Amino acid sequence: MRIDMTGEPGDPRHPNEDYASAALPSSGEGGALVVLDGVTPPRDGTGCVHGVPWFTARLGGALLELATAQRDLTLGSCLSEAISRTAAAHCSTCDLSHSRTPQATVVAARWDEERVEHLVLSDSVLLLEHPDGPVTPVLDSRLGELPPHIRALRSRVRALPEGGAGRRAARAEYVRAVEALRNNPDGTGFYTAAADPAVARHAVTGTTPRSEVSALLALSDGASRWSEMFRLGDWAALLALVRKEGTGSLVARVREAERADPHGTAHPRGKAHDDASAVFAELGPQAPAGEASDG
């Protein structure tokens, strides 16, 4: 068993809004990993006195604890309970009904000798490597399927000069349009983990036999830029890079690509540098039936 993880803020002057961690229970019955990507709010407030890093640490820590200790619960149930616990921790001090209350994307995976369970909510990524080489991405594609009018707004923002009043106004309009689709009670749009535990039922979930998974790689969208934005290689190449050079090298290469295009001319994006987190779990060969795993 090998665990390798890296988390780095996009701007060293600001705290990382991601959360990344993994746990290997002392019982030896597999393990779990969690990556959260906090949603950076506009500057005019969230109704919360704590902030996004506090929220992601609370939610991520609760989810990892539940995924590890409560193995009778599905990952969806673990996420629902983690959201409830986190909401209870600040409902007396914060307005959790605020549309910009702290929220995050979620990737979680859990494994034992028989199966690998996964959960993905919003635009972070989980890669499953199979023993014979192929890599399967687990994606929640709903954020990428925005209505045409919102995609047009996004294109207009990206076409305007950086720092200008026109771009700021267009971006504010785009942000409001996207927010109207987030966690929409009518079932349209996309979902993030915020204060409502019911959102967990919208996560992409599933299980895979343990014999069919040799490694897992969880990525916030700041780390998945290597493939999704900068097109430096496909998912299999990304996982091969991490296996060979580590998660730190992946993040370093993303930073190189960001610095090479500082104004987003070649690769339009909302942030020149984004928080980037990755957790790699190399599960190793499965123990033969009847033998104890040394995991």
Image (tube, rainbow, N blue to C red):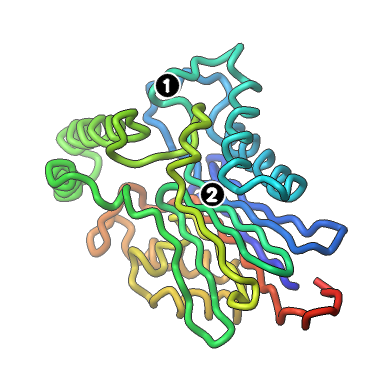
Instruction: Quarter of the image for the C terminus: give it.
Output: bottom right
The mark closer to the camera, 2 or 1, is: 1
Q: Which mark is residue 45?
A: 1
Q: Residue at x 37, y 75 (%)?
A: 232
Q: Residue at x 74, y 55 (%)?
A: 23
Q: How far from the left and from the top, in percent, is residue 132?
A: 54, 87
Amino acid on which the number 1 mark rests in the picture:
Gly
Nearest the camera: 122 or 252? 122
**Label 2 sits on residue:** 9
Which residue is the extreme one toward the bottom?
Answer: 132
User: At numbered mark 2, what does the secondary structure look like: helix, strand or loop?
Assistant: loop
Instruction: Quarter of the image for the N terminus: give it.
Output: bottom right
Amino acid on which the number 2 mark rests in the picture:
Pro
Q: Is residue 127 left or right of residue 114?
A: left
Q: Are marks 2 and 1 in contact (CB under 8 Å)?
A: no
User: At numbered mark 1, what does the secondary structure look like: helix, strand or loop?
Assistant: loop
Q: How far from the left and from the top, in percent, is residue 156?
A: 13, 45
The quarter of the picture where residue 288 lies is bottom right
As measured in the structure, the alpha-carbon distance from the residue carrying label 2 to the one carrying label 1 is 21 Å
How many residues crowd around disc 1 within 10 Å: few (fewer than 14), some, or many (20 or more)?
Answer: some
Nearest the camera: 212 or 84? 212
Q: How far from the left and from the top, in percent, is residue 53?
A: 58, 36
Q: Residue at x 52, y 85 (%)?
A: 133
The quarter of the picture where residue 89 lies is top right
Which residue is the extreme one toward the front?
Answer: 290
Q: How far from the left and from the top, in percent, is residue 144?
A: 29, 52
Q: Residue at x 56, y 62 (%)?
A: 207
Q: Earlier in the sequence, mark 2 or mark 1?
A: 2
Q: Which mark is residue 29?
A: none
